[in-house]
Image (tube, rainbow, N blue to C red):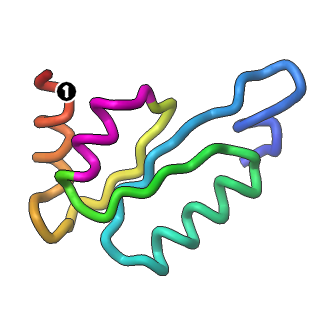
Amino acid sequence: MKSSDCHDKQAIKKHGLIVEDQPITALVIKTLFTEQRCEIDIAENGMIAINQIQKYQYNFIIMDVGLPDMDGFEVTKKSYMV
């Protein structure tokens, strides 16, 4: 990823959501994107992710498919049914 991918002097900062129930994995992914000056939110389960997706307009979402309460495909479907 180029450093200009998330933010440069003329671009708007990108806002992303990481949906991941493993804290260390979420932190590693968040660190990679914040180093590129992206603003990152983390959702630890499907219900939090659905609420976040409906509340904010994300530029990108990284979705774990093996969440404890529902799989990532179900989260995606429910998030965009509103």
Q: Is residue 12 above or below residue 50?
A: above
Name the residue that disc number 1 marks: 80
- Residue 37 percent coordinates (x, y): 75, 46
Q: Quadrant of the C terminus?
A: top left
Can residue 56 be found in the magenta stretch?
Answer: yes
Quarter of the view holding residue 14: top right
Label 1 is placed on what type of residue?
Tyr
Report the number of numbered marks. Answer: 1
Q: Residue furthest bottom?
A: 24
Quarter of the view holding residue 22: bottom left
Q: Is residue 49 above or below residue 44?
A: above
Query: In what element is the residue under mark 1?
Result: loop
State the residue in front, 56 or 75: 56
Taking the image as shown, residue 55 lies to the left or right of residue 36, namely: left
Local crowd size for mark 1, using a 10 Å CA cut-off: few (<14), some (14–19), many (≥20) = few
Q: Which residues are magenta?
A: 48-57
Taking the image as shown, residue 78 lies to the left or right of residue 9, namely: left
- Residue 44 percent coordinates (x, y): 31, 64
- Residue 70 percent coordinates (x, y): 10, 59
- Residue 28 percent coordinates (x, y): 57, 72
Can residue 13 be found in the magenta stretch?
Answer: no
At a point 22% along the width and 42% down the height, the residue shown is 50
At a point 84% along the width and 31% down the height, the residue shown is 8
Taking the image as shown, residue 77 lies to the left or right of residue 57, namely: left
At a point 65% along the width and 65% down the height, the residue shown is 31
Q: Residue furthest right?
A: 9
State the residue in front, 27 or 73: 27
